[in-house]
Amino acid sequence: MLLPPCLCADHDPGPPTIILQGNLSRSIYADDCRFRDPTTDVRGLKRYILAVSNLFEPNTSRAGLVSIAIKSDRQIETEWVLEGTLKLPWRPYIPQIRGTTTYSLNSDGLIAMHDETWNVSAAAAALAVVGVRTY
């Protein structure tokens, strides 16, 4: 399996970060792709892009790709870091989170599942949104 170059480009570091703006390389995702992380579970590429594009302030947020690996013919795993300011009225700052995303491909070679794990709990992430830092 060859890695799609756009998957790496989606994780390029520095503001404005593509993946934090929801400006993903749509051609590599199935329209009904499932996006799951410790706090959300969304089905559908358009719904995910809408949610992500309204989440982080691009000028004060960043994400970076740490590593990328092919795990099998139908699975790619990335390790990444992100931090930034959320687009909420009180502008909470989310300290750096380290995570992994496992991308599972369907029979057409498109990403059908985007499954994230984080180095912080869902509760710790939720507390950071209200200004309580526990990590």
Image (cartoon, rainbow, N blue to C red):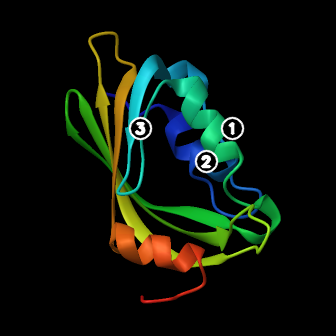
Name the residue carrying label 1: 23
Q: Looking at the rendering, in which quadrant would you find the N terminus? A: top left
Q: Is residue 49 above or below residue 111?
A: below
Name the side, left or right, on which 83 lies relative to 14: left
Name the residue carrying label 2: 19
Residue plotted at (34% across, 17% down): 109
The image's mark for residue 35 is 3
Which badge, 3 or 2, comes first in the chain's sequence? 2
Q: Is residue 126 above or below residue 105?
A: below
Dot 3 amino acid type: Phe
Q: Is residue 133 above or below residue 101?
A: below
Dot 2 amino acid type: Ile
Helix, strand or loop for disc 3: strand
Instruction: Nearest to the eye among marks 1 and 3: give it.
Output: 3
Residue plotted at (70% across, 47% down): 21
The reply to whether discs 1 and 3 touch (Cβ–Cβ < 8 Å) is: no
Observer able to see residue 97: no
**Residue 9 screen position, x and y as percent:** 60, 44
Give the Cα distance between marks 1 and 3.
Answer: 15 Å
Instruction: Nearest to the eye among marks 3 and 2: give it.
Output: 3
The reply to whether discs 1 and 2 touch (Cβ–Cβ < 8 Å) is: yes
Count residues near mark 2 (Cα–Cα under 10 Å), then give few for <14, some for 14-19, many for 20+. Answer: many
**Residue 112 screen position, x and y as percent:** 35, 24
Dot 1 amino acid type: Asn
Which badge, 1 or 3, comes first in the chain's sequence? 1
Count residues near mark 1 (Cα–Cα under 10 Å), then give few for <14, some for 14-19, many for 20+. Answer: some
Residue plotted at (60% across, 25% down): 46
